[in-house]
Image (cartoon, rainbow, N blue to C red):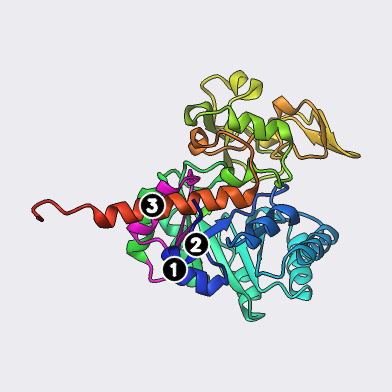
Amino acid sequence: MMADPGTLRTALCDLLGCEYPVILAGMGGVARAELAAAVANAGGFPTLGMVREAPSLIISEIEAYRRLSDRPFAVNIIPAATDPDLLHLQIETCLAMKVAVFSFFWDVVPEAVTRVKTAGAFLLHQVGTLRAARDAEAAGADVLIAQGQDAGGHVHGRTPTFDLLRAVLDTTALPVVASGSIGTGKALATALSLGAQGVQCGTAFLATAESFAHDYHKQRIVGARGEDTVLTDGFVLNWPKGAAVRVLRNSVTEAFGPALMGHDPQRISHEVIAHDGPIPRLRQSTDSPLRTTTGALEQMPLYCGTGASAINAVIPAAQRLNDICAEAQAQLASARQTPMVGQT
């Protein structure tokens, strides 16, 4: 069944210039030009994941994206977890490349928000708490992405996705997007019914043909269920202390036992377990396995949300987007046709 853009269109689509209210999460290392363009050309809104990447890679990925698609896109960077000098260069590079939309995450850095807004850019800011939502709005964000604890990858808060969505909707007049364990049409329909303007998907697009994740990572997601994930700050090298991630269980998390939280990056040995070309990858770092990675892939963080049970195959991103949207339309149509209690 093919999705009809008109029946799912929200104000967010008009703001971002897309057909469906579905955003590709800016997954570092994974959401590169090929995946972003596939999502964009299928009608979703893409984000290039450029977390702590060098300006040269940002330039090459933007150029590659523009060869594949002429549709709008965002670039995701993390001001609070990036060296200030590199952050300055990243923003300068994006602005020089005429990036019109930015996506920020983690603690709100008002100076970074002001900088991109002053340049005339549109800003999506992902938050995990009500406090962060208020801070992002006060700083000048245009859209809030409410990320629940169900999400894969870095998780900023500890509130379930739809509970956080309701709370953020109650406290802001900005458009709000739901993120975290949203990889089905049912979840999209639920988010829209609650008042969200759209959703952001990560894990669902990580397990697609075009994502830059390693095939090992994709297949582990296909074989996983929600209960196979854990939230831990054990993969913390390269990020601030206490930064939690949701990953699939592996030999590293099993070795933690019940001590999934409380890991101090200053006390973690720098043991090389893999490489991306000449670049070493450390055990307990935040680096997930990419197409270019060789080494002990099983020991690396395999980011995955609790919605993994719905992902049963690695398929093209366009197909996954269409499947999600078509199912959402069916769910919403069914809800409209179901009479309320007391109706005849």
Q: Position of residue 36 (x, y in %)?
A: 68, 57
User: Which residue, as the protein is rendered here, is positioned at the far front?
Assistant: 1
Q: Local crowd at mark 2 within 10 Å, few (<14), some, or many (≥20)?
A: many
Of the residues tagged 3 and 2, which is closer to the observer?
A: 3
Type of amino acid under label 1: Thr
Q: Local crowd at mark 3 within 10 Å, few (<14), some, or many (≥20)?
A: some
Q: Quadrant of residue 104?
A: bottom right
Mark earlier in primary sequence (1, 3): 1
Q: Position of residue 91 (x, y in %)?
A: 73, 68
State how far apart marks 1 and 3 are (Cα): 17 Å
Question: In terms of secondary structure, where does tag 2 sit?
Answer: loop
Tell me if residue 140 can be seen.
no
Callouts 1 and 2 close, C-beta under 8 Å: yes
Number of marks present in the image shown: 3
Type of amino acid under label 3: Ala
93 magenta-colored: no
Q: Residue at x 54, y 53 (%)?
A: 322
Q: Residue at x 65, y 46 (%)?
A: 316
Q: Which residue is mark 2?
A: 21
Residue numbers of the magenta segment: 172-199
Q: Position of residue 114 (x, y in %)?
A: 61, 75
Is 229 or 309 nearer to us in this picture?
Answer: 309
Q: Which residue is mark 3?
A: 330
Q: Local crowd at mark 1 within 10 Å, few (<14), some, or many (≥20)?
A: some
Tell me if residue 127 can be seen.
yes
Mark earlier in primary sequence (3, 2): 2
Q: Which residue is mark 1?
A: 10
